[in-house]
Amino acid sequence: MTDNELKQIKMFVLDELRTLYTKPTVNLWFEPMKVVSLNTETVTVSLPQSRKTFVETQYYDILKAKFSEILGFNAELVLISDEEEAELPEEEEEEIKPKSAYKIRFNPEYTFENFVVGKSNQLAQSASLAVAKHPAELNNPLFLYGPSGLGKTHLLFAIVNEIRKNHPDYNILYVTGEEFTNELIESLSMKKPMVFREKYRNLDVLLVDDIQFIAGKLSVQEEFFHTFDTLFKMNKQIILASDCAPKDIDNLEDRLKSRFVMGLVADIQPPDLELRVAIFKRKAMDFGYDLELEILYYLAKNITTNIRQIEGALKKLKAHTLITGQVCDYYVAKEVLSEFFVNAKSEESIIDRIFAFAEKRYGISREEMKSSKRNADIIAARHYAIYLIRKTTNLSQNSIAKLFNKKDHTTVINSIAFIERKMKNEPGFERELLSAIAELRS
Ligand code: ADP
Ligand code: MG
């Protein structure tokens, strides 16, 4: 592990300790820690002699527990003094990676440096960078939104990593809307709401990913409202990410919607071909590949909606070239990946294509189709998409309803009836739909 990664592990442990102890306590006893080394069993931490004895007698168990939690395994904790550290021989360490739930938090590779910028994400990126450089000075709260797989979480971690660099003493917390919810419920059931509040209201920076998760849950929204207000009044930075704009989050209280738009709202749109090529080039480099432009274009043409898929494709390619020893030229890439794309052309991508059809035909975005809005043209696009999904996939009516954020399958039945009637009355429409179905099935 690099020094930076070791430092980051310390940061995570400090974040956890700050939820338990006061700032002076953490600063006095834990801040001077240094994670000296780490292997699959043992984490070695050095402290000035003046702190070591006290920490060892008073805080050993909790410290060990927190390291274990962050690392994802039951770690042996060895405390040494800084003098002992100086005498330590240099040794080769085994490569290890944290593997717990914290893994996602431990994400030093999501940085601004490796976030590729283009038209569709430029506003979100520059706003994030501004917030990272000047927390709580501009754009508070910052609200990022856009469809899945386009880099929202990447940007949130880039902000965390950047702020950590410049303000190592800041109390920063990244959670998902779901984690916030679960933690709140747990604290209430354990009758410890104060612990929860203390944790959330003593932050310098709070990032909540997938905030839309709290919609429809009254007590969670209530608690989040007060968390938000408390931090905001103390001039602390809040950053939120969601799959749609605040006004489009169904069942979200108005007072939250209005607060979410008080700072800066920035969307991320699907990347165009040029940006996809640039992102793929960058990702390929991270995989140790310098891929020909032709291959990059081939990839970019086939992966259009979700950047996450690129990693799957590159892994596949890497595995193939490692096993066969073949050089990765265009033909090899095409052969290996066409298989990958065929396999990936499962339900998910059929649904994706259906949404693309419907978007093109009606000029309505898939977010709108999935929303509860009831304008005539949105309803028409929704019926069209639902009908095609029902006819070309094996999804149950209930799963389709869920996909459209509907509680039960009556929506699906209505859509099918609506489209079948329309097909009867309009032969042109029927022909169009039948050929769409044939194309999707091919
Ligand atoms: P979201 O949170 O919006 O669903 P993620 O942040 O998880 O999306 O991004 C999915 C994957 O795509 C991640 O591996 C991320 O690094 C990558 N990615 C997305 N946008 C970019 C970009 N502009 N440059 C580099 N990588 C990107
Ligand atoms: Mg995300």
Image (cartoon, helix red, strand yellow):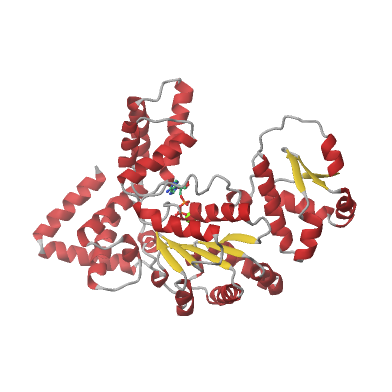
In the image, taking residue 222 as reference, residue 309 lies left or right, namely: left
In-front residue for pair 146/81: 81
In-front residue for pair 190/272: 272
Q: Would you place residue 370 above or below residue 103 in this image?
A: below
In-front residue for pair 166/374: 166
Q: Residue 76 appears at what percent x and percent y?
A: 79, 44
Residue at horizontal 72 percent and vertical 62 percent from the top: 18
Q: Residue 398 appears at what percent x and percent y?
A: 38, 62
Q: Residue 58 appears at what percent x and percent y?
A: 87, 57
In the image, taking residue 165 as reference, residue 292 lies left or right, namely: left
The answer, for residue 43, to whether it is visible in the render is yes
Residue 387 picture quarter: bottom left
Q: Would you place residue 431 above or below residue 263 in this image?
A: above
The answer, for residue 312, to whether it is visible in the render is no
Q: Residue furthest bottom?
A: 255
Q: Would you place residue 242 above or below residue 105 in this image?
A: below
Q: Residue 303 appears at what percent x and percent y?
A: 35, 43
Residue at horizontal 29 percent and vertical 56 percent from the top: 355
Q: Residue furthest top?
A: 325
Disc count in the image?
A: 0
Image quadrant in which the N terminus is located: top right
In the image, taking residue 385 as reference, residue 191 lies left or right, namely: right
Image quadrant in which the C terminus is located: top left
In-front residue for pair 212/232: 232
